[in-house]
Image (cartoon, grey):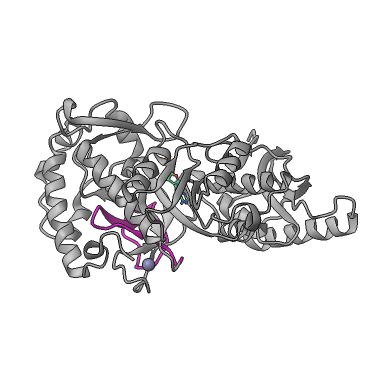
Amino acid sequence: MYWAKEIETISREKLEELQLKRLKDTLENATRCPYYRDLGLGDYRVETLSDIEKLPFTTKQDLRDAYPYGMVCVPQKRLVRLHASSGTTGTPTVVFHTMSDIDTWADLVARCLYMIGVRQEDVFQNMIGYGLFTGGLGLHYGAERIGCLTIPTGPGNTKRQLRFMREFDVSVVHVIPSYALHLADTVENLDIVPERDLPHFKRAILGAEPHSEETRRKVEEFFGIDAFNSYGLSEMNGPGVAFECQEKQGMHIWEDAYLVEIVDPDTLAPVKPGEIGELVMTTLTREGMPIIRYRTKDLTALIPGECACGRTHHRIKRISGRTDDMLIIKGVNIFPVQVEQAFMGMEGVGRNYQIILESRGHNDHMIVRVELDPDMFIDDFKKLEELRKRIIGSLRSELLITPEVNLCEPGSLPISEGKAVRVIDKRTI
Ligand code: AMP
Ligand code: ZN
């Protein structure tokens, strides 16, 4: 049941002892790079875990300022890999790994996969981008570590993906949630019946972008599988940071590898236990490029209490949004995933949506375009109008503003091979 039973079920007391030891080692190592040395990191004394609060935060901007090698703590010849985060503009944020970092990372990912029931007999198809993005290689090495037959298809070419799934008896896929929904559309268009044509398919790992519980359910019901939420970011390696167990009640965040804090994004003070705030993490095992108190901008909360699976590492809630993805519409703060949550579970709603923001006079105007379920009859105007009104009502009670809702034909909205682009902001004021 466990990949690494001892560490996954370690007592909180022992875990904290280990964290403190690793934190001290990390700080010592971190002072070897120009960035943290110049910051005077060596002057801080850490005797308890809560002393972490005295240390400075690290932001994405700091990583950019230290570009290219300013945060590297080992001689260049010991580095074996570079990854970069998925942002497309400005200086990339790069992270370097030594051989031991790659090994530790693969083991963390293997731990996640094993936790959801993946075994050596499984055939694993990785539909997530390889290359600088961490989702591809990160999961790939973890799946190989378990011994799965691992198929590195990467994203796109949906027909070929399905062909491989059928012909190689694929049992597990790793996929971006928006692409999983697109895959379902394609399955339907090709008259593939999941139970009949993909009988080995049992599990999907949904990662890399925010998605709602409703989207998970849609994927699970359509394919007749279990889908698990996987959270990670390149600054903390990538996938393998936090992952749902089979209880599906939050994601275990591996605290032997990361020291976790949740802070108020404005005051930067710790939030009360169980409250939502910004996730801040310190690497505890990385040697090539340790990062201290990294402000992820991701909003989540620690889930109090123990998990029925027996793992002692804390769980975090599904990410509700990024502080920098928050939309301010008519003065109201809205996260795209809240929009999705309002209608994704409704009968008649399809698998894709888009949010368009415009200026009308001096006001913001929000249009939500929602694809219809292929079973919905496009010419039943009464039914369509009822559905449209139901979506508006649900969005109004979720968001407290009333957007315009346009229903669209299945498959008519753009899809992306990487993370979905949900919001098109055309506002001029
Ligand atoms: P990157 O560093 O390019 O891999 O992007 C990492 C970011 O993707 C995170 O900071 C999150 O904002 C987002 N992300 C990754 N996995 C998830 C997930 N399971 N749920 C929500 N957001 C996620
Ligand atoms: Zn659990």
Question: Along the horizontal axis of the image, is 315 left or right of 422?
Answer: left
Instruction: Please determine whether, in this image, residue 151 is positioned above or below residue 113.
Output: above
Which quadrant of the frame does ligand 2 lie within? bottom left
Q: Position of residue 319 (x, y in %)?
A: 46, 55
Instruction: Please determine whether, in this image, residue 173 is positioned above or below residue 77.
Output: below
Q: Confirm whether the magenta stretch covers residue 262.
A: yes
Displayed quadrant of residue 300: bottom left
- The answer to whether residue 399 is seen in the rendering is no
Displayed quadrant of residue 100: top left
Which residue sits at x=63%, y=35%?
429
Q: Position of residue 329 (x, y in %)?
A: 62, 48
Instruction: Please determine whether, in this image, residue 198 is positioned above or below residue 246.
Output: above
Displayed quadrant of residue 165: top right
* Residue 178 vs residue 153, the one in the foreground: 153
* Residue 268 vs residue 213, the one in the foreground: 213
Question: Along the horizontal axis of the image, is 135 left or right of 97?
Answer: right
Instruction: Please determine whether, in this image, residue 126 is positioned above or below residue 264.
Output: above
Count of number-bearing discs: 0
Question: Along the horizontal axis of the image, is 387 left or right of 413?
Answer: right
Q: Quadrant of the N terminus?
A: bottom left
Q: Position of residue 324 (x, y in %)?
A: 47, 43
Question: Along the horizontal axis of the image, is 252 left or right of 349?
Answer: left
* Residue 330 vs residue 122, the one in the foreground: 122
Q: Which residues are magenta?
A: 248-277
- The answer to whether residue 177 is seen in the rendering is yes
Q: Confirm whether the magenta stretch covers residue 174.
A: no
Magenta portion: prevailing SS class: loop
Which residue sits at x=11%, y=43%?
28
Q: Position of residue 171 (x, y in %)?
A: 50, 53
